[in-house]
Amino acid sequence: MSDVALTRPVQRVELDAGAALKEAWRLYRRLFVRSVVMGAVVLGAMNLIEALAGRNATLLPLLGLALSVAGIALLQGGLVEIVRGLHVDGDDDAALTEVLGRAGSRIWKLVSVSVLTALGVGVGFLLLVVPAFVLMTRWAVAVPVAMLEPGTARDAMRRSREIVRGNGWSVFKVLLAISLITVVVELPFALAAAGSGPFGWWLATTIAAALTAPYAAHALTVVYYALVEPGRPVVLEPGRRWRSAWDEEDG
């Protein structure tokens, strides 16, 4: 069991949930085209596989589920990577293939984080509702950690808990706001998809998720940077380079 992700001390600061959400909205608008296009490509392929899986009763549903988990993990990692480019030097001129390639190099760690988080939260809901919300909050920034810091998936989850400690309520408010925004935006698309046939379902669900997933990923990446590197902006001015301590380790 590796301890590498737990060796950097976290500065205890108070997270402003409102400010984090506003910064996430600013990032969402700035990165709208790139983020939504990436989401549409990844989620469109994922939803297509899911639609095909639903029409086949053999092993395809299991393959569809596995590819869906991998697709979501890849997209989350890619969205974190886009923000990292702005955070490090204020520019983000990397091609989407390069961004997804960097996320792909960490795909197993990202998938492991997604699966372990889902299992933990699921068990929490089966036992009592409150433990599930506690775990969701503690592991809120596990994906940014998995993308931006060394260590294993379990290291990322422990590191997330350490980062969030002392700001649980503020982080929960960010998660709650993300959930409410997602429901409000996706509900009209869900209603439109009902009874619209396979193509209508695919189109509506892909557009809805492509619009909401980037904001959620940007918000949690903002939370990560606000707690790990307080006192500096999430987005640097163009051309102003800042190397984080783990950039060299991460390659």
Image (cartoon, helix red, strand yellow):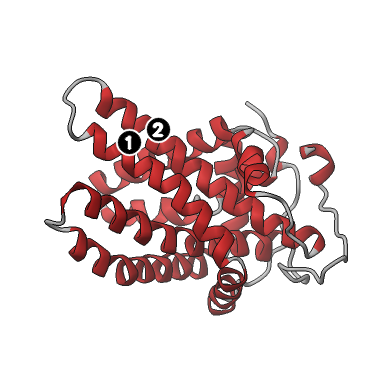
251 or 138: which is nearer to us?
251
Height in image: 220 above or below 81? below
Badge count: 2
Helix, strand or loop at mark 1: helix
User: Does the image show residue 217?
Assistant: no
Residue found 27% across the figure and 48% down from its top? 125
Specify the amino acid type for callout 2.
Leu
The answer to which quarter of the image holds residue 190 is bottom left
Identify the image quadrant of the C terminus.
top right
Q: Is residue 96 left or right of residue 205?
A: right
Specify the amino acid type for callout 1.
Ile
Q: Which residue is mark 1?
A: 49
Q: Which residue is mark 2?
A: 67
The answer to which quarter of the image holds residue 61 is top left
The crowding category of the residue bearing disc 2, from other C-alpha atoms within 10 Å (few below 14, some 14 to 19, many at least 20), is some
Residue found 62% across the figure and 71% down from its top? 30
Q: Which mark is on residue 68?
A: none
141 or 134: which is nearer to us?
141
Q: Are marks 2 and 1 in contact (CB under 8 Å)?
A: yes
Name the spot of residue 151 as percent of width and height, x first.
Answer: 67, 34
Q: Is residue 204 left or right of residue 33?
A: left
